[in-house]
Image (spheres, grey):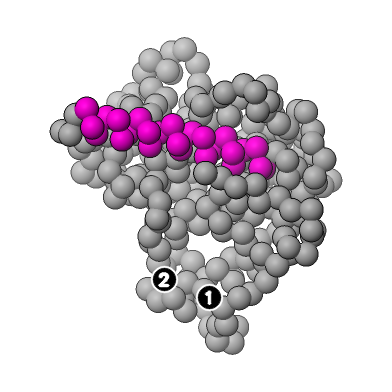
Amino acid sequence: MFENIDSSDDNDEDSLFKQVLPTANDNNEPIDLNKIPTTGEEYLRQVRFQASQLPNFQTTTKTDQNQTTSSNSKKHAWHKLFSSTNTIPNITTKHIVSNDWQNEQCLTFSNVRNDFFQMRDRLRIIDKKYRIAKLKNVNDYWKFCFGNNIPFQSSLSSLEIDDQSKIQNPLPTMTTMITLTQPQLHELLQHEINWLKQCGYSLHLALYMFATLVAIEKPISEDVMYTIRQTCSAWKQIRTNLLNSTDNDYPIDDTLIKSCDLFICIIGRYFGQFDLADRND
């Protein structure tokens, strides 16, 4: 179960970002973030480099009613987490991510994971030969997420969540994600990162990325954690580009900003990648 990581002692939180493991002084050697690290030393070098390149965003401990979801209402359908009705306010000069909001999102995410694995375990007891999805290549994964009506690797920015698209391109459900094995979930997450970069943002893709993270089982291997970190980096880059945009003709999409905040929060705090999390300076 997720534990509240918020602390009233600022020194405790700052200690999460201090270097613990020593690494060689290799500032002159190039670091290729597209290369999967093969040793612990390479992994630590990439982590340090990623942390040094990421901008700092201020967080606050004050609760904003527009930023939180009532803990009394159970919203375990993950598409509701991306609802535009609770979008983060458009803040152009200083982006604030509330600690209270982050803790509540992690708690909700933990509850969704608990529900998912309980359902999966019950299904395994009832039917030990339940159906496993047959996904052999990237095209199969694309169809798994977007159906047959969306051309492979086409732009996703126009894919809306409405009644018609729900019929043609079903949203992820627990019963759908249960059909994937852990290796398939890892491969799906890798494809989702590429689609996010190449095909653009869509709420539909964000929902599948969230569902994929829900279904990834602990303990998490180094390779899978590396991919999870790459997911966070991709969303951080999108948020940075949005907040630094000088195009005044197009207002910032609050739903997209909230999606970025949510993934950064879950990966940074729930999955323990604190160097990627929004911190309270």
Three-letter amino acid code at the position of disc 2? Pro
Residue furthest out toward the left: 129
> Which one is in front, 220 or 51?
220
Is residue 233 inside the magenta stretch?
no
Q: Where is residue 82 in the image (x, y as percent from the top left)?
A: 58, 29
Say if mark 2 contacts mark 1, CB within 8 Å: yes
Residue 261 appears left or right of 61: left
**Type of amino acid under label 1:** Arg
Residue wearing tag 2: 37
Locate residue 214: give its quadrant. Answer: top left
Query: Which residue lies at the image location 19% right of the left edge and 29% below the top edge?
Result: 127
**Residue 235 visible here:** no
At 60% from the left and 51% from the top, the residue drawn is 269
Foreground residue among 254 and 86: 86
Q: What element carries label 1?
A: helix
Q: Assign the magenta stretch its main secondary structure.
A: helix
| Left or right, residue 97 beside residue 214 | right
Locate the C terminus and report the quarter of the image it occupies: bottom right
Q: Is residue 251 above or below residue 268?
A: above
- Examine the image and state in which quarter residue 273 appears: bottom right
Label 1 packing within 10 angstroms: few (<14), some (14-19), many (20+): some
Magenta segment: 102-126
